[in-house]
Image: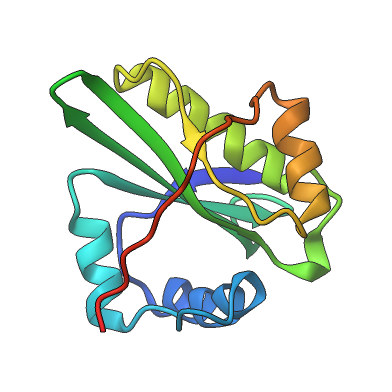
């Protein structure tokens, strides 16, 4: 497999997002082309793309890494990890996560946080295997109507 940063909003990448995001969540639609362009232009977000079996292969998975500065340090957060159901079990999620960890360390973060739905058992096993620890905290969300 091949992991790289997405830098251009190609038709192939847009189509991959249209296919992969519904496999991740039904709560939010895939991005529009304009939203994808904004994401790739963001200074704080990195969209990682996994191709199978090599750099010329199909886009099989995605991960977004967000690195940002706050008064108490540099933070990093992993969001929207998804591997196409056809390619699960091939180590793609692990490779994406390991690359995100490397980029976060290189970006000055002292660690990386993420959230994962408890029903995503394989994902949760992977994160524990990689050394993530479950935090005892309250996560709040304020929805804008």
Farthest right residue in view:
89
Q: Residue at x 78, y 69 (%)?
A: 85
Q: Residue at x 29, y 17 (%)?
A: 108
Q: Quadrant of the C terminus?
A: bottom left
Q: Which corner quadrant of the image does residue 43 belong to?
A: top left
Colouring used for the render = rainbow
Q: Residue at x 27, y 58 (%)?
A: 40
- In the image, taking residue 26 as reference, residue 91 lies left or right, namely right
Q: Position of residue 78 (x, y in %)?
A: 47, 43
Q: Position of residue 111 (x, y in %)?
A: 44, 20
Q: Quadrant of the N terminus?
A: top right
Please tell me whether residue 50 is drawn above or below residue 132 in the rendered image: below
Please tell me whether residue 11 is drawn above or below residue 24 in the rendered image: below
- Number of marks: 0
Q: Which corner quadrant of the image does residue 75 belong to?
A: top left
Q: Residue at x 50, y 74 (%)?
A: 17
- In the image, taking residue 98 as reference, residue 13 lies left or right, namely left
- In the image, taking residue 116 as reference, residue 44 lies left or right, namely left
Nearer to the camera, 100 or 76: 76
Q: Position of residue 23 (x, y in %)?
A: 66, 75
Q: Position of residue 88 (x, y in %)?
A: 81, 58
Please tell me whether residue 128 is drawn above or below residue 8 in the rendered image: above
Please tell me whether residue 37 is drawn above or below residue 78 in the rendered image: below
Nearer to the camera, 73 or 109: 73
């Amino acid at each position: 497999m091949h992991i790289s940063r997405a830098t251009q909003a190609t038709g192939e990448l847009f189509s991959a997002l249209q296919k992969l995001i519904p496999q991740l969540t039904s709560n939010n639609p895939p991005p529009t082309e304009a939203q994808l362009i904004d994401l790739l232009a963001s200074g704080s977000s990195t969209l990682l793309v996994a191709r199978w079996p090599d750099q010329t292969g199909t886009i099989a998975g995605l991960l977004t890494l967000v690195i940002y500065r706050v008064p108490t340090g540099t933070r990093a957060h992993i969001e929207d990890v998804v591997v196409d159901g056809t390619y699960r079990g091939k180590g793609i999620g692990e490779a994406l996560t390991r690359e995100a960890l490397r980029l976060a360390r290189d970006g000055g973060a002292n660690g990386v946080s993420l959230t994962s739905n408890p029903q995503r058992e394989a994902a949760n096993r992977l994160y524990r295997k990689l050394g993530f620890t479950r935090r005892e905290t309250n996560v709040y969300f304020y929805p804008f109507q």
